[in-house]
Amino acid sequence: AQSVTQLDSQVPVFEEAPVELRCNYSSSVSVYLFWYVQYPNQGLQLLLKYLSGSTLVKGINGFEAEFNKSQTSFHLRKPSVHISDTAEYFCAVRNAGNNRKLIWGLGTSLAVNP
Amino acid sequence: NAGVTQTPKFQVLKTGQSMTLQCAQDMNHEYMSWYRQDPGMGLRLIHYSVGAGITDQGEVPNGYNVSRSTTEDFPLRLLSAAPSQTSVYFCASTPDGGAYTEAFFGQGTRLTVV
């Protein structure tokens, strides 16, 4: 069965510092990988996704993620965070193809401090 | 471009009351789903639908009913509300193939059962 593990439930960081939010998954088939962001009291919005091709994926707001098939990881990175990046970040996976059911990680709360 | 619309945004119910959470999408997506979000538990799938007239249970379906009479609408019914159903509920829709593979989320309904 598929599963997603977000290795850190909370990540505190100072403004302008780099950050990495870690995500590992398990699956026996090809997958699509996603990172979503949820700002306080809002819905989820797509940050970036990996479908195929280049393993380095760039998303909105300066975020990027790297797909590592051998490590079954999809870590999210930003070289310099802003206060406005404070949010909950969710990693999700689904089977490549027509099965659209998503498997979710439990989320990582990123707190950017001045 | 409305996307996924959920109503109401906030609701307080008394134990034992029933209500329907509304979800509508205008993107002609076949796949729709309902999640609940609780602190520390991420997103849990309640019910989903792969098209009009077809619904199925997710991981936490007890106490909830759904129906899908049209492609656009996917209401979630609480038959007899319980305090354990206090949560934030999200509706999402996903296209069938094409360039977009991600789920699109509504803004959520914050439900309190007293």
Image (cartoon, rainbow, N blue to C red):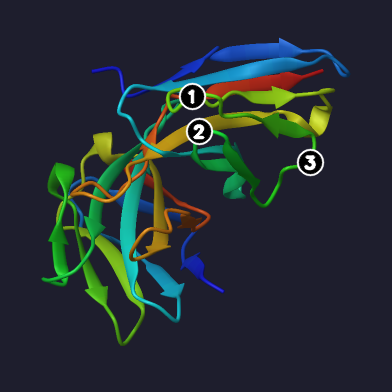
On residue B1, the disc is: none
The image quarter in which residue B47 lies: top right
Q: The C terminus of chain B appears in which quarter of the rendering?
A: top right
Instruction: Kindly identify which chain the residue marked by label 2 belongs to.
Output: B
The image quarter in which residue B16 lies: top right
Quick one: B66 or A53, which is closer to the camera?
A: B66
Farthest front residue in view: B53
Sequence-wise, the earlier of marks 3 and 1 is 3
**Residue B39 visible to an observer of this rendering:** no
Residue placed at 59% from the left, 23% from the top? B75
Farthest bottom residue in view: A70
Farthest right residue in view: B16
Q: Which amino acid does label 3 sit on?
A: Asn
Instruction: Kindly identify which chain the residue marked by label 1 belongs to.
Output: B
Q: Is residue B71 above or below residue A54?
A: above
The image quarter in which residue B109 lies: top right
Disc 1 element: loop
Sequence-wise, the earlier of marks 2 and 3 is 2
Q: Disc 2 designates what residue?
A: B52
Quick one: B27 or A32, which is closer to the camera?
A: B27
Q: How crowded is mark 3: few (under 14 residues within 10 Å), some or many (20 or more)?
A: few
* Labels 2 & 1 near each other (Cβ < 8 A): yes
Between marks 3 and 1 in the image, the one whose residue lies nearer the viewer: 1
